[in-house]
Image (cartoon, rainbow, N blue to C red):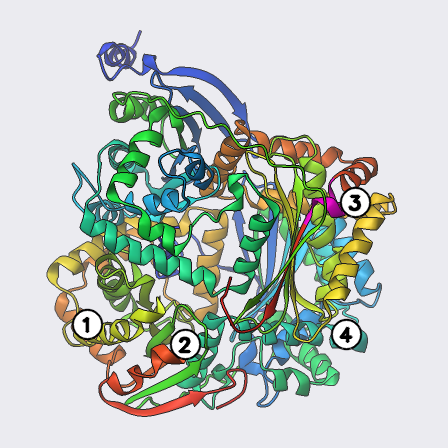
Amino acid sequence: MKKLFLLLALLALPGIAEAGIRLKSKGAGPNYLYEKDSKALASSVQLVFRTGSLADPKGKEGLSELAFRSLLGATKKRSKEDFQAAVERLGASISIDVGAGRAILSVDALSDNLEPALQLLAEAVLEPGLVDEDINAIRSELLAGVNQELSNNRRILRRIFRQAIFRNTALAFPPEGTLNGLSNATNEDVRAFIASQLKAKDVIFAVSSNRSEAEVKGWIEKTFANFPEGNAPALAMPSPEKIEGRTVFVMDRPGSTTTEIAIGHHGILANNKDRDTLETGLFAFGEDMTSRLFQELREKKGWTYGAAAGFDLFERPRRYPGAFLVWSFPQAEHTQELVLRALEIYEDYAKKGLTAKELSFAQKSLGNSYPFKFATSRSRLTARLYELLENAPHHDVAEYRGIVNGVTRGSLRSAIRKAHNAENVAIVLVGDPERTKGLLTAIPKVKNVVKITDPLAAF
Amino acid sequence: MTRATLALLALLALPGLAWGKTEKVKETKLPNGLVVHEYKMKNGMQLLLVPDKSAPVFNYQVWFKVGSANEKLDPRLQKTGLAHFFEHMMFRGTKNVPEGQFDIQLSQAGAVGENATTWLDRTNYFESLPKEKLELAFRLESDRMANLKIDEKSYKTELGAVIGELKMGKDKPSRVASEAVWDLAFEKHPYKWTVIGTEEELHSFTVDDANYFYQTYYAPNNATLILIGDFAIPNAIALAEKYYGNYKPKDIPKQELPAEPEQAKKRKREITHPLANANFLAMGYKIPQGNHPDMAALEVIGAILTTGDGSILEQQLIQTGIASHVSAGPYRTRYPSLFFFTVQMAPEKSDSKAINAFDDAMSRIRKGQLKEEEIERAKNQYLLMAYNDLLDSSAIGRNLGEALVSTDNYLNEFEVLDAVKKVTAEDLKRVAATYFTDEKLSFVRLVPGKGASK
């Protein structure tokens, strides 16, 4: 595959809804978002909750994931096996996606069977069994998944980077949690979590279907009529400690033929007023395959299969703090030269921003590709959900092009000064120690070197 | 007759622009209502045009019927890795578009999803663009089909990126194990060799090899253009004639495949990987080529085993914490292939639990002990997966293209969908007894350990 990074560049586009798409609320109750897809043979309904791993108590990291996954066990009416069989015989599939600040239960179903599939989803949400046997089994499954991360250098890198910049906050661990956290979260914690978090005023129903809006809305109102009233507790937004100086975090993985590298710091919020400006700059700096970083490290030097930089590489900007990172995975023998060069390129960008030619290029590219945000019903739905959940501003195509074309080199430099800093960064290296050890003294201005031995534990 | 019609007829009469040269073959309605219009150009290039006005964008894919399997058999090359390496070179420069400009022009035009892939039987190139950029796509894609300029410097630089990709794969235990299964299962057939080749092979390729490969296999009569999105068919055909119409067909080498000797007994191999923290099991059973009528039953068997939370092995291995990932299903390829079953074991869990669970499940299928509801579940899960894959234009194009290169019938995937609906317990019983036998099995067990990763 030639280009891994185009997808990342696509992800870098601000997620905002087009003109004419507006949210419809049912009084103070749940929100409904609907997108028609007349060609679809399968439909999707998502129940989106404004909760997630930010609600995990300290020492019980992974509780929210465990709790939401437990909804797919037995219900009050049938065993786990019977429930799964009933869903899947319909040509339906229920999945769970827990993030830091949102949790999504989705049902995908053959459109002809959407109504009975919704009834089963309602059964899982409104009448969950939450029996010990199922919760214990799901905990074992999650523990196996977390353990498995130890065979994957990229997953290890992400774990370490997370802790490096979000230490002592609820963002320090991914929603999958930790081995200790999952073990400490009791079955009673799971039941209490579900009882407190699944409330009518916080849920959003997001639908993409070839069935009519009235039809689907009617089914939802009927099947979820008994949704528990009230609000879930508001999530506390974490305030990570400021990163001072350059700290290198290194984990030895003897035998690695590539080195996973991340250089980064805190990111921005979804509603940051400079976001479109900053993302215009990042497109030309590191998000596209025509970017400086990709061109220099891969196209000219051939040190790596890929190199990229942006806010979205970690997680799309949201209503809680995110991250900015430069990421690459060079052949092990090019580790040192790549890290030093990547730092130089980032230092230059943080100081000077873009050239006039680069800025003009980014403006044209982003403006021309913006309509893809709305090319499918599911992408439109994603954009609307993002706007609603993360307080992200809405722009239609013309408005977005106006904003991006209005970015100047001066306004970009000013935004960069507030959001980027090449001096205060975490540098994470996961690779063969023979290839990383020389680097520890070669990187300029390093304040501290931290050796990681267990990326699954707190450090 | 309107003025517009007269103008169109006048256009048709112009030499070089006359889309009358391009013949309509047939049109077929897909399950989602879109229609595939098939055309054949005079030079043998196939066009699959699927208009869809639901968004002001289009997806452009060019598929070449050449992949890694063709290289080993080529008398000049006799190595693997060039088809993929060459795919990378296609993004460099041409006589008309200087190095780097291909990406720059597409990116500036708002392209998304620009990429390419190489597999056993094919290489494909694709991107999506706003509808106003249709001619740009034709111009750039047709240009690199015929006018590529390969120089020593860019060749060496790209080699670094390809070796980086190869090493990235070597750091993944699951990938190393899967490649070992292909190697173990085939003795003579080129599916034995990895698509990306070895580091030694990659270093041995020359610019002359790349030019030879390009001149031999990249030809209009070895290519299919799949275009899906917001465009008018007459315009697309006029552009195809304008940009591809002058390319001459070539004599594509007809390769005689070496007969793969009948496998007489189960093959086993144990390998170590320095980055693994738990065992990874990969099993490949010999199955027929992609257009074989048993493919639907094989897909259903894959779904019975691992598709959905209610599948047998999800329940027995994942939901019990014995394994963290399982997968099963047939590789549909042009020549006889493999049904893969893989298990990522959890640390310190016994392999025998996974192997026994698989054997028990297969035994139930062979003996016809599955309940009707289990079969219905699996069939519907397969349909759901397939329907979800028809939601965007690039996925529809991929379905048509993969079917074309592996079966010569771009509608094969949709025919398999229909066949899946008709699969019976008897079909499953027969297919399980035919293909899931010890003498068709190649089994690789990857364990954590020092030493070479392969």
> Which residue was labeled with disc 1?
A349
Q: Is residue B440 magenta?
A: yes
Between marks 1 and 2, how big is the CA–CA gap? 29 Å
At 73% from the left and 80% from the top, the residue drawn is A191
**Could you tell whether B5 is left or right of B390 in the image?**
left
Question: Mark 4 vs mark 1: which is more N-terminal?
Answer: 4
Sort mark 2 into few (<14), some (14-19) or many (20+) by Cα contacts within 10 Å.
many
Residue picked out by circle 3: B375
- Foreground: disc 4 or disc 1: 1
Residue type, label 1: Tyr
Report, in whole angstroms, how far the alpha carbon at label 4 lies from the one at label 2.
Answer: 44 Å
- Tell which tag, 1 or 2, sits nearer the viewer: 2
Q: What residue type is labelled 4?
A: Leu
Q: What stretch is highlighted in magenta?
A: B435-441
What's the chain of the residue with tag 4?
A: A
Q: Is residue B188 above or below residue A360?
A: above
Q: Position of residue B164 (x, y in %)?
A: 36, 60
Res. A104 visible in picture: yes
